[in-house]
Amino acid sequence: MDNLYVIKIGGNIIDDDEKLKLFLRSFASIKSNKILVHGGGKLATKLADTLGVQQKLIDGRRITGAETLKIVTMVYAGYINKNIVSQLQSKNCNAIGLCGDDAKIIQAHKRIHPSIDYGFVGDIDKVNAEQLKQLINSGLTPIIAPITSDSEGQLLNTNADTIAQEIAKAMCEYYNVQLIYSFEKSGVLLDVNDENSVIKKLTPQYYHELNTPLQGMGAKIFAGMIPKIDNAFAALNSGVKKVIIGNAEKLNDLINNSAGTTITNE
Amino acid sequence: MDNLYVIKIGGNIIDDDEKLKLFLRSFASIKSNKILVHGGGKLATKLADTLGVQQKLIDGRRITGAETLKIVTMVYAGYINKNIVSQLQSKNCNAIGLCGDDAKIIQAHKRIHPSIDYGFVGDIDKVNAEQLKQLINSGLTPIIAPITSDSEGQLLNTNADTIAQEIAKAMCEYYNVQLIYSFEKSGVLLDVNDENSVIKKLTPQYYHELNTPLQGMGAKIFAGMIPKIDNAFAALNSGVKKVIIGNAEKLNDLINNSAGTTITNE
């Protein structure tokens, strides 16, 4: 099977024109098959502020009212996605910007929660791996914005980390998949205050040890990293070969395994 | 050769949720190959007003400064395009939203004009008909937003009528192409004040007669219609079989030739 990199680029890099440009240059230079999933950055929040639309977050997830949905659709699917695609095209990467509803690559439904109304937030039912493979086979590089829709045509704001994970899992049917979460941090840090304390390799056993404070490892893994790591292990258990977490400015090193944290079952 | 309809939907319909919904239902029901090109509507102007970005128009073309470009990219490529795609998907039309830079379907350059600086406005160099054909052959229906980019990755605001015309012309290599300009009017009117005065068939000879007031035809073709008609004849001269101009609410009738104005060389 061919290799496929599913790469998530985080918000802080998207907010920084220069860093984004360098990241996209590295991304364009990857010879293997690749898919980019991008988050939102601060632009949506800024636009909402300017327009006087109040933002609410619960557990890091944006509560998406009708006005907020309009804003994130404009910013994620419009401004950010098209800027990334046009920059990649200028670097000879034949990018195609997609949301979940384009070519029906992702089917989702509005989140149902017993106590919290998340608003127009999507949970993923299914990734159309065959359609993505078809686009890739025809020489295209999918660039995916975190907007999906339900079967009734309702747009839904959807977590980009989850989209990357679900795509990576689904694509295992056709490719050797590596999932890369790239952002502003160097990787999973043993000590959240020390950027040099990157854990090079994280196995389930080691993670279990780190998460057992009584064993005296003294690890201070940033709480915000825990869902990413849990997602990573879930992805590995669904067939993804390797999950790499690290600095978007070192994308080539992440791919070469010379930077970041590699999460693996072995 | 197979038939292909290239259909442009105008701004006034896009601004009206109910009319847009009905239009999209008709569009989804077309059995032949089809491409939809959409304009912008008033949402971009409204958003610019709210954000305090002043809008300037010269000859009906928006002067596109950096802030306006951001707004039209968000509104056209984000909000409008994704809403159309998700509605079509819910009607079993496998739509895919695209700008010019996606899959490099349109190459453009920033408009150069001896006296007017249009800002970030694009003129089209080339339509990638082969790529569009490939997408159509794989069962997809392209939905095109009027944003293109130049070879350096600069996004450009681009006239949707022109995009529809250029796509129609380029696709003649592979299809029997009919170009439909659908909007809020019933067609080309003999008397601009009488919606019942639709000219059913417009040939170059008849048009010439209408445009020669001394011959006493008394025609009052709305001046805003002239560029559309000129574009239509240019399209016919480049191989397009038929150009139809008419009411978006009667899309099926336009296709059946029972409504609107058919522009033809014969």
Image (tube, coloured by chain):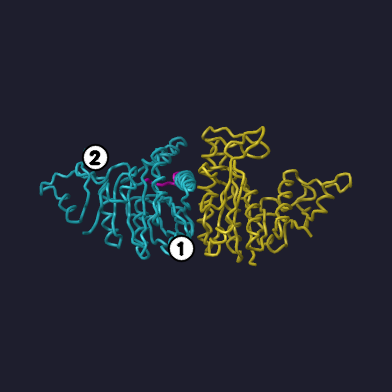
Chain colours: A yellow, B cyan
| Numbered range of the magenta stretch | B62-68
Quick check: A110 left or right of B23? Answer: right
- Residue lying farthest right? A215
Tell me if residue B66 can be seen.
no
User: Which element is circle 1 on?
Assistant: helix
Write the residue at 17% across / 53% down: B206
The Cα atoms of the two marked residues, 2 and 1, are separated by: 40 Å
Look at the image and say whether residue B64 sits in the magenta stretch.
yes
Quarter the N terminus of chain A occupies:
bottom right
Residue A72, how many percent across, how many down?
54, 42
**Disc number placed over residue B258 in the picture, else none:** none
Write the residue at 48% across / 52% down: B94
**Which residue is more in the foreground, A187 or B100?**
B100
Determine crowd level at label 2: few under 14, some 14-19, many 20+ residues with C-alpha closer than 10 A: few
Q: Please name the residue that numbered disc 1 is placed on.
A: B134
Determine crowd level at label 1: few under 14, some 14-19, many 20+ residues with C-alpha closer than 10 A: few
Q: Amino acid at mark 1?
A: Gln
Q: Quadrant of residue B41?
A: top left
Quick check: B43 left or right of A210? Answer: left
**Which residue is more in the foreground, A60 or A260?**
A60
Q: Please name the residue that numbered disc 2 is placed on.
A: B195
